[in-house]
Image (spheres, rainbow, N blue to C red):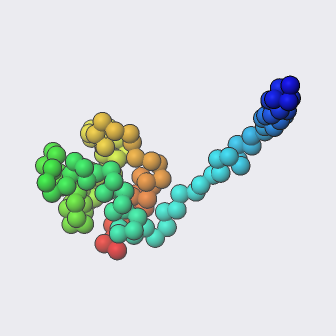
Amino acid sequence: MKALKTISLVLTIIVATTGCYYDVEEELYPSIECQTMEMSYANDILPIIESNCYGCHNTVAKFGNIILEGYSQLLKHVDDGSLLSVIRHSAGFSPMPKNGAKLLECEIEKIEAWVADGALNN
């Protein structure tokens, strides 16, 4: 009998505390603004390229005969416009990452800002 009362009490508490749950979208998913000011190759751009591109476009794999490993190699594709075109999934370019999800919009915005600021090796 005591066990039955305990179980009943626990169930009552569970129902009472979960039945009135209220979600406020702004509190659960705060808007995170993409920071694109003063992008640094070493701190901001390189980590994006390493995690999304190096698997296929490093000095060993060089898929499509494209190497993005190293600033000077990456700069070639910045200068000819292909880097931004492939990550934006522009018409006429093979969308990258190949067979993968498009980069996060904030990552693309960071690369765009870095390129617009002169694609410095900083």
* Residue at the outermost bottom position: 122
Q: Quadrant of residue 92?
A: top left
* Whether residue 3 can be seen here: yes
The structure residue drawn at horizontal position 38% and vertical position 39%, both measured from the top left corner, is 101
Task: Give the left or right position of residue 65, taking residue 27 as reference.
Answer: left
**In the image, residue 31 lies at what x, y percent?**
63, 52
Task: Give the left or right position of residue 67, taking residue 119 as reference.
Answer: left
In the image, 85 versus 44, the foreground residue is 44
In the image, 87 versus 47, the foreground residue is 47
In the image, 107 versus 117, the foreground residue is 107
Q: Is residue 108 above or below residue 113?
A: above
Q: Is residue 115 above or below residue 107?
A: below
Task: Give the left or right position of residue 11, taking residue 41 as reference.
Answer: right
Q: How many marks?
A: 0
**In the image, residue 18 lies at what x, y percent?**
78, 35
The structure residue drawn at horizontal position 58% and vertical position 57%, both measured from the top left corner, is 33
**In the image, residue 45 lies at what x, y percent?**
37, 62
**In the image, residue 59 lies at what x, y percent?**
15, 57
* Whether residue 117 can be seen here: no
The structure residue drawn at horizontal position 33% and vertical position 62%, both measured from the top left corner, is 46
| The C terminus lies in quadrant | bottom left
The structure residue drawn at horizontal position 86% and vertical position 25%, both measured from the top left corner, is 1
